Image: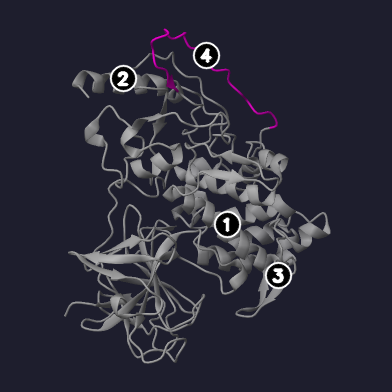
């Protein structure tokens, strides 16, 4: 591309999106829900000459909180070989991921400044203006961004929100609800929301809002038996199993994570409804909105879904409950900035010891019950098992899991240790390492300050789902699980994680050496930390 064409593309994209910046905000005040959806009529564009190739600008949904399509500037023509869509990069985007969402090759996505256009697997600068070939079907899902990403995951904006106080203050059905859980005993509704949200690293506000939208448990009372027994709206083929709040939350958090992280990775591009109809997702959605559109496609019929994903649907209820989420998002987003790099990590065991790489990239959190386990969520975790004479859940190993880097222990639980790497005491901010299946005996304690190489505990089968003694390790940044083989892959002592065709498969690669994951722990899975 010649310099003149590069400059022309930059000027063209700026003109296309100039109308968005000048548009007055339509976001309601935190205390109100709009009774009327305000709309704008896009200004008519001048007719293009027969030889011109149009640059197609779909209604711009990249402005947070926008309630309606924005008027576009008069379009000029550009010889790009076909219709194009103007798109502003979002946090977590790469050219490869955008290619999957738009249904094009990453090499076909262009920008006026090639210096700002990295390789397909590298994170894009949020706000970078791009042109993408338009090969979308005529019908796509609504493009309005309903909820910022920071209101889905356990992000910095959750700091200070108290689930118990909110639930009790509103005095709804949830404030009086309790059920008995095997691991925790009698558990209140608010406590169940906190437990499930924290384990899955999701915002408890979102889970409360979904409960309220589906069954009115938070602000009022359920209106029928179905809402009382299935407060998240899912019955499934095993209706007896999914009855009750906790198991409804187990299913709902798994599916919300599935939608969020499959969108992040480019694996989710469309929806299938209960009547068998399908719809392509608008590729300009943010991950939070895509997760909601996916969730409601599983709990609503087509008409109910259209109502839920409209600005007057779930998003209006969410603003009523918590105020304007986009104002909060301004202080914390993008959650995944361009240029983000992983801290230097070692393998999580002592030098000179042989372990097995038993499971490649797979779900960061799994509930301890087979029916609701999903491998469609955040494929953020890797598993390692110590060498042992017997397989299965044998007594806790004498081998030690060690800290791959220094940090502060900010959470402990049944088999769980969370190490906060920035040391501020908040799991919601910066980098965290999540360890699962740490035996309670000899484990570190809450508040312990660790240096790289310090002992954390012994691998076991405690916590989560486990069929053999091992360590389950995952990373988070600003409360979002970081995909183990994504744009910022796991890197421990130079061993780089790569995914396989299905969750659990994968390899660790260093200097031409390849270690292949296998849950049976054969010879090719063996890995030893350098002495």
* Residue drawn at the location 26% of the way across and 43% of the way down: 119
Q: Secondary structure at mark 4?
A: loop
Residue 87 image-quadrant placement:
top left
For image coordinates 27% across by 36% down, the residue present is: 117
Q: Secondary structure at mark 2?
A: helix
Front tag of 3 and 4: 3
Horizontally, residue 184 falls left or right of residue 341, namely right
The CA span between labels 1 and 3 is 17 Å
First in residue order: circle 1 vs circle 3: 3
Task: Determine the CA span between mark 3 and mark 4.
Answer: 53 Å
- Residue at the spot 34% in from the left edge and 22% down from the top edge: 80
Regarding residue 340, the answer to whether it shows in the image is: yes
Q: Which mark is residue 241?
A: 3
User: From the viewer's perspective, is residue 318 above or below residue 47?
Assistant: below
> Which range of residues does the magenta coloring cover?
35-56
Of marks 2 and 3, which one's residue comes earlier in the chain? 2
* Distance from the alpha carbon under mark 4 to that under mark 2: 20 Å
Where is mark 2, residue-wise? 11
- Which residue is identified by label 1? 255
Q: Quadrant location of residue 301? A: top right
Residue drawn 36% across and 92% down?
389
From mark 4 to mark 1, how far is it between C-alphas?
Answer: 39 Å
Q: Who comes first in sequence, dot 4 or dot 2?
A: 2
Kindly identify which numbered label has been placed on residue 32: none
Pick whichever, 399 or 217, lies toward us: 399
Please name the residue that numbered disc 4 is placed on: 43
């Amino acid at each position: 591309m010649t310099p003149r064409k590069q400059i022309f593309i930059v000027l063209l994209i700026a003109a296309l999106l100039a109308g968005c910046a000048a548009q007055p905000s339509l976001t309601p005040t935190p205390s109100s829900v709009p009774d009327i959806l305000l709309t704008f009529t896009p200004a008519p564009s001048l007719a293009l000459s027969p030889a011109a190739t149009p640059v197609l600008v779909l209604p711009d949904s990249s402005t947070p909180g926008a309630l309606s399509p924005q008027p576009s500037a008069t379009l000029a023509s550009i010889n790009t070989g076909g219709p194009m869509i103007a798109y502003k990069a979002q946090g977590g985007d790469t050219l490869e991921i955008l290619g999957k969402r738009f249904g094009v090759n990453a090499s076909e996505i262009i920008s006026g400044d090639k210096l700002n256009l990295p390789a397909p697997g590298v994170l894009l600068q949020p706000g970078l203006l791009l042109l993408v070939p338009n090969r979308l079907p005529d019908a796509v899902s609504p493009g309005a961004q309903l909820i910022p990403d920071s209101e889905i995951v356990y992000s910095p904006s959750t700091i200070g929100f108290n689930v118990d106080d909110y639930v009790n203050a509103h005095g709804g059905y949830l404030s009086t609800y309790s059920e008995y859980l095997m691991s925790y005993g009698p558990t209140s509704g608010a406590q169940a929301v906190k437990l499930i949200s924290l384990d899955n690293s999701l915002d408890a506000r979102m889970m409360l809002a979904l409960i309220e939208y589906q069954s009115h448990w938070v602000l009022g009372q359920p209106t029928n038996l179905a809402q009382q027994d299935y407060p998240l709206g899912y019955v499934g083929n095993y209706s007896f199993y999914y009855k009750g709040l906790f198991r409804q939350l187990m299913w709902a958090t798994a599916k919300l994570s599935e939608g969020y992280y499959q969108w992040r990775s480019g694996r989710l591009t469309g929806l299938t409804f209960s009547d068998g109809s399908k719809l392509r997702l608008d590729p300009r959605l943010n991950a939070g909105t895509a997760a909601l559109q996916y969730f409601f496609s599983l709990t609503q019929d087509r008409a109910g879904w259209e109502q839920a994903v409209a600005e007057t649907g779930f998003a209006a209820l969410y603003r009523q409950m918590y105020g304007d989420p986009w104002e909060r998002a301004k202080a914390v987003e993008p959650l995944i900035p361009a240029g983000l790099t992983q801290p230097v990590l070692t393998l999580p065991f002592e030098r000179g010891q042989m372990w097995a790489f038993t499971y490649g990239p797979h779900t960061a959190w799994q509930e301890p019950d087979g029916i609701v386990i999903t491998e469609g969520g955040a494929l953020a975790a890797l598993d390692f098992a110590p060498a042992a004479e017997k397989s299965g859940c044998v007594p806790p190993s004498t081998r030690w899991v060690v800290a791959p880097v220094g940090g502060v222990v900010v959470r402990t639980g049944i088999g769980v240790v969370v190490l906060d790497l920035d040391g501020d005491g908040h799991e919601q901010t910066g980098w965290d390492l999540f360890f699962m299946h740490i035996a309670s005996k000899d484990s570190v304690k809450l508040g312990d300050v660790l240096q790289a190489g310090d002992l954390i505990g012994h691998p076991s089968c405690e916590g989560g789902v486990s069929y053999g003694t091992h360590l389950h390790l995952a990373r988070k940044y600003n409360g979002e699980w970081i995909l183990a083989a994504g744009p910022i892959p796991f890197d421990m002592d130079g061993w780089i994680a790569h995914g396989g065709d299905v969750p659990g498969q994968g390899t660790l690669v260093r200097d031409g050496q390849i270690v292949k994951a296998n849950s049976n722990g054969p010879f090719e899975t063996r890995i030893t930390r350098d002495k």
